[in-house]
Image: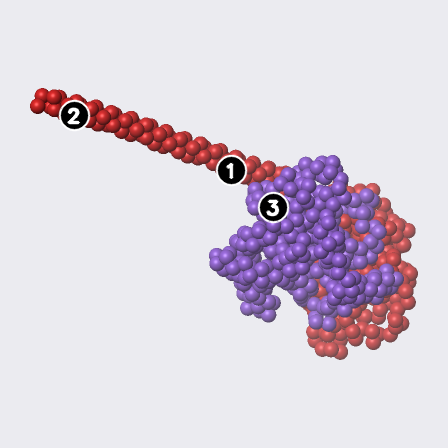
Amino acid sequence: MSISRRKFLGWLTAAGLSSSAFGKVAHAATTRHFEGHPDSLGVLYDNTKCIGCRTCEAACNKVNDLPPPDRPFDDLSVLDNKRRTDPKKYMVINKYDGSVNVETPLFGRTGCNHCLEPACASSCFVRAYTKTESGAVTYDSSVCVGCRYCMLACPFNIPTFEYDAALTPRIRKCTMCYDTRLVKGELPGCVEACPTESFTFGKRIDLLRIARERIRRYPGRYLDHIYGQNEMGGTSWLYLSGVPFKQIGMREDLGITPAPQFTSSALAAVPMVVGTWPLLLMGIYAVSKRKDKIAKEEKEQALAEVTAQVKAEADQKVSEAWKKAAQEKEKAIEAAVKQALEAAADVETEENS
Amino acid sequence: MSQEATTNEKSFISPFNIIAGIIVLIGLYLTVRRFTGGLGAVTNLSDNNAWGIWIGFDLLTGVALAAGGYVTAAAVYIFGMKKYHSAVRPAVLTGFLGYALVVLALHYDVGRPWRLPYPFVVQQGTSSVLFEVGACVALYLTVLFLEFAPAALEWLGLKKARNLAVKFTLVLVVFGIILSTLHQSSLGALFLIAPSKLHPLWYSSFIPVYFFVSSIIAGLSMVIFESTLSYRFFADKMDEAHLREKDDIALGFGKAASYVIAGYIAIQLMGIGADNEWQLLGTGFGLWYLVELFGFFGVACLGFAIGAREKNVKLIRWTSAWAVLAVIVNRFNVSLVAFNYHLPASDRYFPSWMEIAISVFLVTLGLIAFRFIVSRMPILYEHPEYEDVH
């Protein structure tokens, strides 16, 4: 590394002072593109320089005070298996088959990439993660509930969990040595230890320039792609490689959308549901109430009509009956009169005879 | 309340009690192990597979299957389907117990359960979908408790408090539906953040809608399924209204479920179309997706439809179990089967027997609580003092 401590401290101060006008909140999908805190720091890993000596792993273990490894760091047979981060190691170097022949293997680094807009930070419901202005993504175990949603959210599968801790399990991950070294003006452990300068530490914006310069100068040596420039919206760690990144265990299908954007529109729907549902529900309630009321009224009306009809019919019947009775009475009277007249006529005839 | 004294004074040693007792003992033993040895001592969880069946089954499925509460309350109080009134109390009770168990299960799953209130009282991570889920589940559990309160208060004979609680019914129902809409969908939205890990056939920006609509399916089916079981085991607790209405409820809810499932299948296919993933249907995962969508949901849709048309209550009851299974399969697929689909088989997750045993233990606790409450409180019958007042 060719960066003086003074220069480095200057950067760190600058990064700290220009603390973000962007804030740390996740924004809904907009045309805005967050390109990281100004002057934030990062590391460029150049896989063409890496010899897989595991010195960085040893340094990481030491500076972070991690538990001793199962096998010593100078035991390179460890590289025969693909490994991932775990509570004992914040970063690993894995060995991959070379593209030319197996005799010249390739190496790849797995560890926190310190996303510009980290999935872990956006997914954490207690804000245990912080994307600091320095670029490092740090973690605060004093608030962590241990829900492990960050592990599910991280596209790089980096955060690890202390599954064996009964009562105080923590998430463990690379913090770019933020608390232990960066704030003191020291380089991250892995960067300082590397004997081949596979790691370059500096302002992200400078690292991008350096990386582009290397690609320009040695087109045969590098793939024309800086991994981390745009992946998941950009990461503070950047990667150069001579072979497709897929071949050194890195996913090429992650896309360039920052993780917080995947959930922002779903979250944006919350206030809309809270606002519109009462209207909708009370509207339906009112309609169903009204329907009930109308049905009741119609029923009453129908009942009244029927009653009226029945009454009218009954009245008619009664009046008809009266009429009939009256007619019959009349008839009877007529008959009686007729009979009486006849009787009288008979008497008259008898008298006359 | 003289019923429970006279009708059900059987011996304490019954098959149910023996089996439940054994499960509870195993559960207690594993609980001790979990909180002395950590998650690693009882689960197969790993750094690649952070969430197992305690999330996939206990949380995702548990919440979906407890949806009967809001679905039934909405049907009866909002849509005015009063003939299903007798279904409300059992559904609300199941919902309340379901959510209580979900919260209990989370105490096993998270690393430091006593910090579960932290997101609300210490630091609010409002950009997290999980924050929304947590807030809604906590609030909805409270709502369900209040909705359930009248039954408990009737049992306790606290007339004034009960009448007060009943007054809030409509407000609680509306609040409950809003909260359910939010967290049922958010459980799906949890996975939005990981498009690179969930198989594209299951990943969709519509996943919150899928989860919400399928929760309605789960809710309707669970009400039918549960009333079947209640009739089988607690027929003596049911009053005339329950016995008279239960077939009506099965037919009505079955018919509704049939429509909802048809809609669900349609929006699933729209999602596939929107992302243009038809070619994936020809793969192994595609086949499994088709089995889930048509073998589980499709068959359930058909079963309900035929059952409703031919007034075949028996078919509807069987179909309800199948539909419940369909929702379980869906939640398992999203959270476990299709999740991390890109990892080699050796890195995939399969639950340990202890994880399964804890889940069984929690379900058993729910059954015990349900039995305890149903045998004592006016759930399957109306309290004689309060008949026809609501």
Q: Residue A314: give x, y in percent of width and height.
A: 37, 32
Q: Chain of mark 3?
A: B
Colour chain A is painted in: red
Q: Which residue is mark 1?
A: A291
Say what amino acid the circle numbered 3 marks. His
Q: Is residue B247 visible?
A: yes
Q: Amino acid at mark 1?
A: Lys
Looking at the image, is mark 1 or mark 2 earlier in the sequence?
1
Q: Which of the 4 image quarters holds residue A83?
A: bottom right
Residue B154 position in % (x across, y down): 72, 43
Q: Is residue A110 left or right of residue B318?
A: right
Of B259 and B26, nearer the camera is B26
SS under mark 2: helix
The quadrant where residue B58 appears: bottom right
Cα distance in 3D space between marks 3 and 1: 18 Å
The residue where tag 2 is placed is: A342
Tell me the distance, in whole angstroms, between the alpha carbons under discs 3 and 2.
81 Å
Task: Check if mark 1 and mark 2 are on a common chain.
Answer: yes
Q: Which mark is residue B85?
A: 3
On the same chain, marks 3 and 1? The answer is no
- What letter labels the chain drawn in purple? B
Q: Residue at x 54, y 54 (%)?
A: B251
